[in-house]
Amino acid sequence: MKNCPACKSGSIKSFFKSRDYFLSKEEFLVEECNECGLRFTNPRPGFSEILKYYDSADYISHDSSRKGLLTWIYTNARNYMLNKKFNIVSACSKGKHILDIGCGTGEFLNICKSRGFESYGVELNEKPREAAIQNYGLEIKKSLDDYLLEDAKFDCITLWHVLEHIHDLGNTMHMVKQLLKPEGSLIIALPNSSSWDAVHYGQFWAAYDLPRHLYHFNKSSFAKFAGIHKLKIIKILPQVLDSFYISLLSEKYRTGKNNFLKAFLNGAISNFYARKQGNAYSSLIYILHA
Ligand SMILES: [Zn+2]
């Protein structure tokens, strides 16, 4: 890409090089836009080419059958987060029509459904999509176009750590805005590449997750991105558990070992500075209105 995927500026520079520590071990370059500050993986695998980088039973956001301590921690943290997420949605949503984009195997939507929300999802990948339909009887479509064709409108649209995976950023935001009711809330959760743990781990920071993460937002670049799409940030909330999980993975990438104690300490330090510096957490949840 010769231009920034968010603001289209041609003024971009190298930020750093890192690897896909999770799977392929291939090296990738992250660049930074001089205009809006967005960091993005460039060059990046194309839309169909990138599928092979997800091709692992370890990519646990799509698989809940694996065992092991990391998965145990992840599963418990996820259950805690599912409740947190529902409370956020419930607090900021004026009605009960929710669309979760990149809903994976549907655990979050199932919670929403069981608590009285009319719950819909989008999941591109067939395996998790079918699991969500089979396991929870949810209505999940393959793409946003399917909802646009039905002229559907939602009180709340959520993208929990999904936006950073989407190739066609501009078109996706355009479609999301069309699907949102005039007073609807858009909720976008993202890693924060300016958090203490991101700076501490540098190229080993697990939330760079190259090349699966195509963009590496921080609060400032996300605020500009929201402005480009004429969206107002109403509130920013922390995801306090992410610093621990990300530190655990980052320690593994850096040393090849599970340093639980060190990861726990660094997660706590990250949250300490995040609170002190005003919402500089490892992951942030943005609540937006059109
Ligand atoms: Zn830009």
Image (cartoon, rainbow, N blue to C red):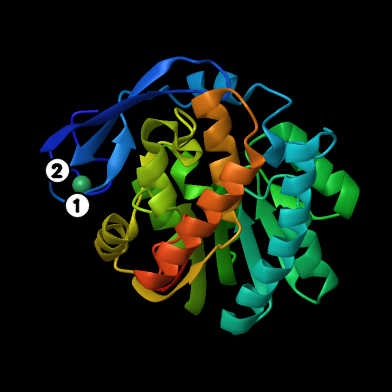
Q: Pointer 2: what residue?
A: 9
Image x and y of residue 276, in percent: 38, 71
Q: Residues within 10 Å of mark 2 (few under 14, many from 20)?
A: some
Q: Are marks 2 and 1 in contact (CB under 8 Å)?
A: yes
Specify the amino acid type for callout 1.
Cys
The x and y percentages for residue 228 are 25, 60
Q: Does residue 113 appear to the left or right of 121 in the view shown? A: right
Q: Which residue is mark 1?
A: 36
Residue 148 appears in the picture as rendered: no
Res. 111 image quadrant: bottom right
Which quarter shows the C terminus?
bottom left
Which residue: 58% across, 22% down?
256
Within 8 Å: ligand 1 and the Cβ of disc 2? yes
- On the image, the x and y values in percent for residue 117 come to 75, 73
Q: Which one is in front in this view, the residue at disc 2 or the one at disc 1?
A: 1
Identify the residue shown where x is 48% and y is 57%.
269
Residue at mark 1: C-beta within 8 A of ligand 1: yes
Q: Secondary structure at mark 1?
A: loop
Seen at 37% across and 48% down, the residue is: 193
Label 1, residues with CA under 10 Å away: few <14, some 14-19, many ≥20: many
- Please name whichever residue, 118 or 198, is drawn nearer the observer in this view of the structure: 198
